[in-house]
Image (cartoon, rainbow, N blue to C red):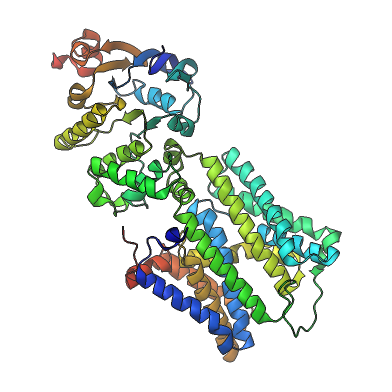
């Protein structure tokens, strides 16, 4: 029986720069898996390869026993992997509701049914009261939650979150953490890239640490954060 | 279907719409022949603007060569009529697929190879120019000397062959405009409409939500081309003469997109409002300029230019969105 989601020896080179260097890991169903590392460690590159935005130079990515590396982003999404963007990209002139509707319509052509699901997702993400507002008028925390809502509306089995907490105040971070916990409790597997250690420690079952494209640690958050290589490269010596 | 037609539009909107439709239905009883031809022109631009709006306003693909679809529709139906005696309604069955195929070719070349934005616009101009030059040399349809449908002084209206008096053409184009409006309304409220808007707003984000953007952009260009070709068939049978230099000329493509731009790109009522304002005002200005003896060539174009300038500067979203706020016709969530 193959893993729910598995990355096997994936590499990506941009000209002379080896952005991701033979990274391998497995994510179990129902897990919250975090990828951390300093800026330029290759997190977003890895993320983009999973989401279909980039094709790996070598290695395989498998989801539910099916190879998905090199598929187009829309094909990856239809297979049940939804993503958010690090720099949020809501549909600016559409309302919050219509933004989420676009996601919900992926699984059903029926507008009424999609609308019901849209309402449910908006309630979950605390966006229901703002459903009539155009996306470009929202504050950053709202836009971040809209990004998650839209991805969630596509009914994914694996949710990829690219720094959804970045730029948020601690209270906002805690709010998203609570929402993600709840989603996870209902069976959603989450893979997140995160800089906010407060969120990583609160959420992740396991953590993968990247540095210069290579994986330097993989394990439980408490264990990983004690590893000298991680402390030195990422957390900083003073964290000891 | 019916519920989709009525969804999201406030009651006042429907009342205004019904009043407008009734006014247009009874208009021929009250206007003279000249005004009737102006109304036909207005509705013609409202219809073609609606068709163009599917591509630009909904799916966000700027076509500056829509004259090619008008021309292909017009020439196909005219050729069938002149050479084989096939009437316009049957001719549509050939004219629409021809234009759709052309749209599919342009769309495929652009969307498969990532030609987007202004480069896509240039590609559409290029194709319209190919067609213009090409049709100049096609003897079968008269070449540059023009292609003419048999005309006579009609006393009866032959709807089946579209031979008759202006009032018949008026009702035909009115029916087309109403049908296009309802069709676009339904499209916008269904899955495809949401997907188009998503593509227009942010194509990469749309793709990340599982939308096959290539496919939906292709559908947009094919539908838009087919609808525009219907206007072409109307054009051929209404004017009875076709010249490549006129039909496919870039100024025709530009003329056709002004109404939705002025009225409001991406809105359902924008093309109709824009067509009324632009055509109505430009005809009025022609009259006024003529009356005061200030009748130099290009006056109409200057007026068009000024009008566009004012609207683009003052109301970049078009007049209709502004009017909606003014009249309190906003959609309620």
Closer to the camera in the image, B74 or B64: B74
Closer to the camera in the image, B94 or B206: B94
| Rendered image quadrant of residue B76 | bottom right
Query: Is residue B206 visible in the rendered structure shown here?
Result: yes
Query: Is residue B121 visible in the rendered structure shown here?
Result: no
Question: Considering only vertical position in the picture, is B319 above or below A9?
Answer: below
Q: State the residue at coordinates (68%, 68%).
A: B234
In the picture as drawn, the residue positioned furthest to the front comes out as B2
* Residue B133 on image: x %, y %: 76, 57
Using residue A222 as the reference point, say whether residue A63 is left or right of it. right
Question: Considering only vertical position in the picture, is A112 above or below B16?
Answer: above
* Residue B92 on image: x %, y %: 70, 61
In the picture as drawn, the residue positioned furthest to the top comes out as A228
Q: State the residue at coordinates (42%, 28%).
A: A51
* Residue A221 on image: x %, y %: 21, 16
Q: Which quarter of the rendered picture does the C terminus of chain B lie within? A: bottom left
Total marks shown come to 0
Closer to the camera in the image, A13 or B2: B2
Using residue B31 as the reference point, say whether residue B309 is left or right of it. left
| Rendered image quadrant of residue B298 | bottom right
Q: State the residue at coordinates (32%, 30%).
A: A162
* Residue A186 on image: x %, y %: 26, 29
Q: State the residue at coordinates (42%, 69%).
A: B319
């Amino acid at each position: 029986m193959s893993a729910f989601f598995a990355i096997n020896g994936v590499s990506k080179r941009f000209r002379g720069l080896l952005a991701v260097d033979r990274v391998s890991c497995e994510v179990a169903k129902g897990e919250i898996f975090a990828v951390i590392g300093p800026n330029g460690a290759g997190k977003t590159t890895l993320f983009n390869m999973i989401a279909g935005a980039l094709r790996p130079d070598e290695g395989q990515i498998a989801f539910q026993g099916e190879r998905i590396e090199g598929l187009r982003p829309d094909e990856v999404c239809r297979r049940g992997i939804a993503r958010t963007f690090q720099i949020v990209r809501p549909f600016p002139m559409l309302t919050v509701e219509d933004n989420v509707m676009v996601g919900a319509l992926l699984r059903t052509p029926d507008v009424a049914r999609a609308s019901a699901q849209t309402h449910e997702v908006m309630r979950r993400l605390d966006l229901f009261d703002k459903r009539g507002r155009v996306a470009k008028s929202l504050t950053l925390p709202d836009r971040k939650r809209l990004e998650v809502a839209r991805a969630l509306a596509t009914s994914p089995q694996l949710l990829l979150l690219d720094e959804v907490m970045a730029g948020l105040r601690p209270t906002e971070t805690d709010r998203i953490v609570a929402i993600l916990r709840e989603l996870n409790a209902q069976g959603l597997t989450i893979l997140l890239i995160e800089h906010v250690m407060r969120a990583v420690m609160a959420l992740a079952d396991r953590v993968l640490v990247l540095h210069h494209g290579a994986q330097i640690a993989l394990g439980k958050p408490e264990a990983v954060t004690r590893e000298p290589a991680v402390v030195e490269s990422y957390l900083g010596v003073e964290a000891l | 279907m019916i519920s989709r037609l009525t969804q999201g539009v406030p009651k006042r909107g429907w009342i205004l719409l019904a009043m407008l439709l009734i006014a247009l239905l009874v208009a021929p009883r009250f206007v003279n022949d000249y005004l009737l031809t102006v109304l036909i022109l207005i509705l013609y631009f409202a219809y073609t603007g609606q068709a163009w709006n599917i591509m630009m306003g909904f799916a966000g693909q700027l076509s500056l060569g829509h004259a090619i679809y008008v021309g292909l529709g017009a020439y196909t139906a005219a050729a069938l009529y002149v050479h084989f005696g096939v009437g316009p309604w049957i001719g549509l069955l050939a004219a629409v697929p021809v234009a759709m195929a052309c749209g599919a070719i342009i769309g495929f070349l652009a969307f498969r190879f990532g030609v987007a934005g202004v480069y896509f616009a240039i590609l559409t101009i290029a194709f319209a120019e190919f067609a213009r030059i090409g049709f100049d040399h096609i003897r079968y349809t008269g070449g540059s000397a023009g292609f003419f449908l048999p005309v006579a002084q009609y006393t009866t209206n032959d709807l089946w062959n579209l031979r008759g008096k202006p009032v018949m053409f008026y009702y035909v184009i009115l029916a087309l405009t109403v049908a296009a409006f309802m069709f676009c309304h339904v499209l916008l409220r269904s899955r495809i409409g949401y997907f188009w808007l998503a593509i227009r707003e942010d194509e990469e984000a749309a793709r990340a939500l599982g939308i096959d953007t290539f496919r939906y952009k292709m559908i947009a260009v094919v539908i838009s081309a087919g609808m525009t070709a219907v206007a072409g068939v109307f054009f051929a049978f209404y004017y009875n003469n076709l010249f490549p230099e006129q039909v496919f000329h870039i100024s025709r493509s530009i003329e056709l997109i002004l109404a939705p731009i002025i009225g409001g790109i991406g809105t359902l009522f924008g093309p109709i409002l824009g067509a009324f304002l632009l055509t109505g005002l430009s005809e009025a200005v022609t009259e006024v300029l003529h009356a005061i003896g200030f009748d130099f060539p290009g006056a109409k174009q200057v007026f068009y230019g000024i009008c566009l300038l004012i609207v683009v500067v003052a109301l970049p979203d078009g007049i209709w969105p502004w009017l909606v706020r003014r009249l309190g016709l906003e959609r309620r969530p």
